[in-house]
Amino acid sequence: MKKLYLFAVFTLVMAIMVSACAAPAAPAETGAMEEEMVEEVTISIITAQGPLADGLVALIPQFEEENPGIKVEVAPFPWTTFFEKVISLARTESGEFDVIFADDPWMPNIVDGGLSVNLTEAYGATRDDDVPQVSYDVFSWPPPYGPIPLDFQTGERPDLHALPIQGNVIMFYIRQDILDERGLDPPVTWDDVLAIAEQVHCPDCDPPFYGYNVRGAAGSDALALLWSMGGGIFDDEFNVILDNEAGCDALTLYEQLSKYLPPGGNTYGTTEMVAEVVSGRAMMGIGWPGDAYAAFEDETDSDVAGKMLYLPLPASEVGAPHVSM
């Protein structure tokens, strides 16, 4: 099997393929009868541990039945060191895996580092109409819109360096059952979120219950808050605008929400954030359906399955847009 170093990517989560498999062998003649002989190949995939890996494993029997001669192996890898693993595999041109999944914010590292294959040029990859176009946009290079670093403003046609594998749009989750018990409406704005958090927060209860939950480690939650308050990090000319009024409002909001977090919540990653929810200790927060909500609704391991409500992110004020990412 000839290895070609492409990639696969998440978040929406998307994929950049890493290899091309050999074609099936030509039919072989056996006496009076011809039998089609298919060379068996194995496609090895590395992805992050969790629902995405579980979903891929669940699809293997169907894929192998529809594609005789092709076997699939999935190797789940801890998310905390997954980026380093992906970049190491590509830079060393390792043949250990054929398909590698990665997160879309890694695209500058991947493409500018010469670690991907231009799928448009190499394979004539095109966009499917039934896939949200933003799922392709985030893996096209150069970036088709938005603030673009000067070094990448080449005027070249944006080509695909990835293919979508998992649509994953950040949303707001909240305990519907507790809203109902207290006669509360779902939040529309962040002021509503703060009011609900204050009412339900009870860290001294047994067991404790926290009004808000967050992925406090560097990542999406802070950026989602910034965007929902009408802010941004750069404008379209790539000037820094983080220190404007909207940016200050977002940081103030984050500080206010932090009053209602579990102890140590400001350092939580996805695993810790999910644990607070499935154990019934957290009221609400921001999460990715692909790696969090499946765990929330798992009736075998979650105390809150069937009790959750999922919403767009709250707005900065009534009538303002509900943004996502």
Image (cartoon, grey):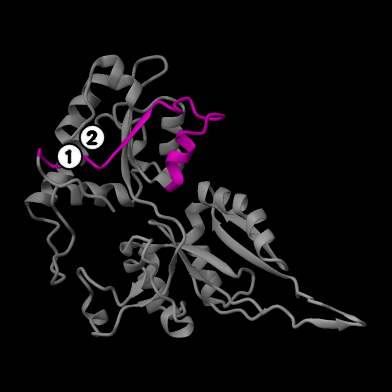
Question: Residue at horizontal 33%, vertical 48%?
Answer: 170
> Is 44 situated above or below 116?
above
Residue in front for this viewpoint, 25 or 117: 25
Q: Report the disc number at residue 257.
A: 2
Q: Report the disc number at residue 127.
A: none
Q: CA distance from mark 1 to mark 2?
A: 6 Å
**Quarter of the image with the N terminus in it:** bottom right
Q: Position of residue 71 (x, y in %)?
A: 70, 64
Question: Residue at horizontal 53%, vertical 47%?
Answer: 50
Q: Position of residue 169 (x, y in %)?
A: 34, 50
Question: Residue at horizontal 41%, vertical 14%?
Answer: 206
- Name the amino acid type tagged 1: Leu
- Name the amino acid type tagged 2: Leu
Q: Secondary structure at mark 2?
A: helix
Q: Position of residue 168 (x, y in %)?
A: 39, 52
Question: Residue at horizontal 46%, vertical 27%?
Answer: 279
Q: Position of residue 100 (x, y in %)?
A: 53, 66
Q: As drawn, is 261 to the left or to the right of 89? A: left
Q: Main secondary structure of the magenta part?
A: loop
Circles 1 and 2, Cβ within 8 Å, touching? The answer is yes
Confirm whether the magenta stretch covers residue 314. yes
Q: Secondary structure at mark 1?
A: helix
Residue in front for this viewpoint, 128 or 285: 128
Confirm whether the magenta stretch covers residue 139. no
Q: Residue furthest front?
A: 32
Which residue corresponds to mark 1? 253
* Magenta region: 290-318
